[in-house]
């Protein structure tokens, strides 16, 4: 379990670093759009569509990291009111359901990618399929991280430390 956790730690760090870089890029192109609109009086039309792609690329994989680190939206009042032994199995069921959701999200998004591959986004000239790629990546990551949580719930293993990216 420790080797898998270390691998998932690395995967989480990669997701966070890539999302951070994408966020910096998003801020830069949005700044360019504002500069173009108000200073040059010539709005770059591609920025809005590119920004949507970047937001998708940031939010879905980072949501998967939230599943692993348990900072995703969770309503625990009902679970906490149950006896301790039952709480553990409710957690297993919830984590398994989240994992199944991730598998379904990846599978059905793959169909969207296949359907949209030949369609081009007019303003930026890339395939429409790139809009749906983060759904596949996020779904796979959600399924993997939820499976890890199920194993941790069943075995009673400690939860991993929160992923903190430091520049050393």
Image: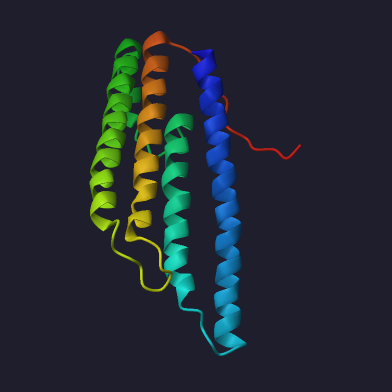
Left or right relative to 83: residue 62: right
Left or right relative to 7: residue 111: left
Foreground residue, 54 or 115?
Answer: 115
The total number of labels drawn is 0
Q: Is residue 160 visible?
A: no
Instruction: Using the rendered view, name the quadrant where residue 88 is placed.
Output: top left
Instruction: Using the rendered view, name the quadrant where residue 106 is placed.
Output: top left
* Residue 86, above or below 125: above
Identify which residue is drawn at 28% across, 44% down.
110
Q: x%, y% of residue 144?
A: 39, 28
* Residue 65, above or below 46: above
Q: x%, y% of residue 11?
A: 53, 32
Q: x%, y% of residue 166?
A: 70, 38
* Residue 13, above or below 84: below
Q: Is residue 144 visible?
A: yes
Looking at the image, the residue that sits furthest to the bottom is 41
Q: x%, y% of residue 39?
A: 62, 87
Identify which residue is drawn at 39% across, 41% down.
138
Instruction: Name the image colouring.
Output: rainbow
Foreground residue, 104 or 133?
Answer: 133
* Residue 16, above or below 32: above
Q: Name the quarter where the C terminus is drawn.
A: top right
Identify which residue is drawn at 33% across, 60% down.
128
Looking at the image, the residue that sits furthest to the front is 118
Instruction: Using the rendered view, name the quadrant where residue 163 is placed.
Output: top right
Identify which residue is drawn at 35% across, 13% down.
84
Left or right relative to 157: residue 140: left
């Amino acid at each position: 379990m420790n080797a898998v956790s270390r691998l998932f730690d690395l995967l989480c760090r990669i997701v966070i670093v890539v999302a951070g870089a994408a966020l910096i890029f998003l801020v830069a192109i949005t700044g360019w759009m504002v500069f173009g609109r108000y200073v040059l009086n010539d709005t770059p039309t591609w920025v809005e569509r590119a920004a949507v792609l970047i937001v998708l690329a940031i939010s879905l994989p980072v949501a998967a990291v939230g599943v692993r680190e348990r900072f995703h939206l969770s309503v625990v009042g009902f679970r906490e009111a149950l006896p301790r032994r039952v709480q553990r199995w409710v957690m297993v069921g919830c984590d398994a359901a989240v994992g199944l959701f991730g598998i379904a999200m990846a599978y059905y998004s793959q169909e969207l990618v296949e359907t949209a591959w030949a369609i081009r986004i007019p303003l930026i000239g890339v395939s429409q399929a790139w809009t749906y790629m983060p759904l596949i990546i996020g779904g796979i990551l959600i399924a993997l991280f939820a499976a890890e949580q199920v194993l941790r719930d069943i075995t009673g293993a400690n939860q991993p430390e929160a992923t903190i990216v430091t520049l050393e």
